[in-house]
Image (cartoon, rainbow, N blue to C red):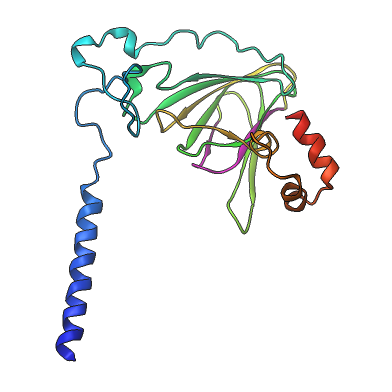
Amino acid sequence: MASSLGFKILFMGLLSTMTCFVALAIDVNPLQDFCVADADSPVLVNGLVCKNPNDVTEADFFFSGLNEPGDTSNQLGFNVTTVNVVQIPGLNTLSISLVRIDYAPKGINPPHTHPRATEILTVIRGHLRVGFVTSNPDNRQITTVLKEGDVFVFPEGLVHFQQNVGEGNAVAFAALNSQNPGVITIANAVFGADPDIDADVLAKAFQLNRNTVLQLQERF
């Protein structure tokens, strides 16, 4: 009996040790100078396949246009100019991307999340009210107003927003620690899902009547 118990303890210890070694063996960093994305490759991987280094040029690491204001003539009054691995193939495996965000007066970047990245935002022009909400069960809102030169961080995966509270247009730049951070705009995802989420589910979740949910789904 004692021998059997000892064997079980030894086995669990070895299993734990092997698990630690496997975890330590995961390679999260590039293994070469660069891995420029080959958008034409039919191979599907977690990320993008590398282009032949001999075919790489300076254009693979270049983007122009962040000095140009984005078009904010929409219902929300904001525009995001994205610079990720799609625009700069050389960002593949480098875990970084950039956006320019333009806001019309009273414009908002509505509540959304980045499932794969933390965001650090710097205000270049104007005043922005910014905030994020902590996870369940507290759902505490962390919020403040930023002026030119101020910096704010939105932790990975948390719902966050920005609102122009100044008199004129506002501009911010943000860096994200992913080559492709992704974005989930909460209202679009919930009320604009394709096909629709069942109205009864949303009515109960948001404590709304079913007709209100149907009207929202039509708008999105």
Drawn side of residue 26 relative to residue 111, left or right:
left
Task: Indicate the quadrant containing the C terminus: top left, top right, bottom left or bottom right.
Answer: top right
Q: Main secondary structure of the magenta part?
A: strand
Residue 73 image-quadrant placement = top right
In depth, the one of 102 and 157 nearer the eye is 157
What residue is rendered at 35% in x and 22% in y? 91
Residue 148 image-quadrant placement = top right
In depth, the one of 86 and 105 nearer the eye is 86
Vertical arrangement, residue 136 with respect to residue 110, above or below: below
What residue is rendered at 53% in x and 29% in y? 121
Horizontal and vertical percent for residue 202? 73, 47
Q: Residue furthest left?
A: 3
Drawn side of residue 195 relative to residue 88, left or right:
right
What residue is rendered at 21% in x and 78% in y? 9
Drawn side of residue 34 relative to residue 70, left or right:
left
In depth, the one of 41 and 8 nearer the eye is 41
Drawn side of residue 67 relative to residue 41, left or right:
right
Vertical arrangement, residue 30 with respect to residue 53, above or below: below
Horizontal and vertical percent for residue 127? 66, 25
Looking at the rendered structure, the number of numbered marks drawn on it comes to 0
Q: Residue furthest bottom?
A: 1
Horizontal and vertical percent for residue 118? 47, 38
Please say whether residue 159 is one of the residues in the magenta stretch.
yes
Horizontal and vertical percent for residue 49? 29, 25
Q: Which residues are magenta?
A: 151-164
Vertical arrangement, residue 139 with respect to residue 89, above or below: below
Task: Indicate the quadrant containing the N terminus: top left, top right, bottom left or bottom right.
Answer: bottom left
Please say whether residue 16 is one of the residues in the magenta stretch.
no
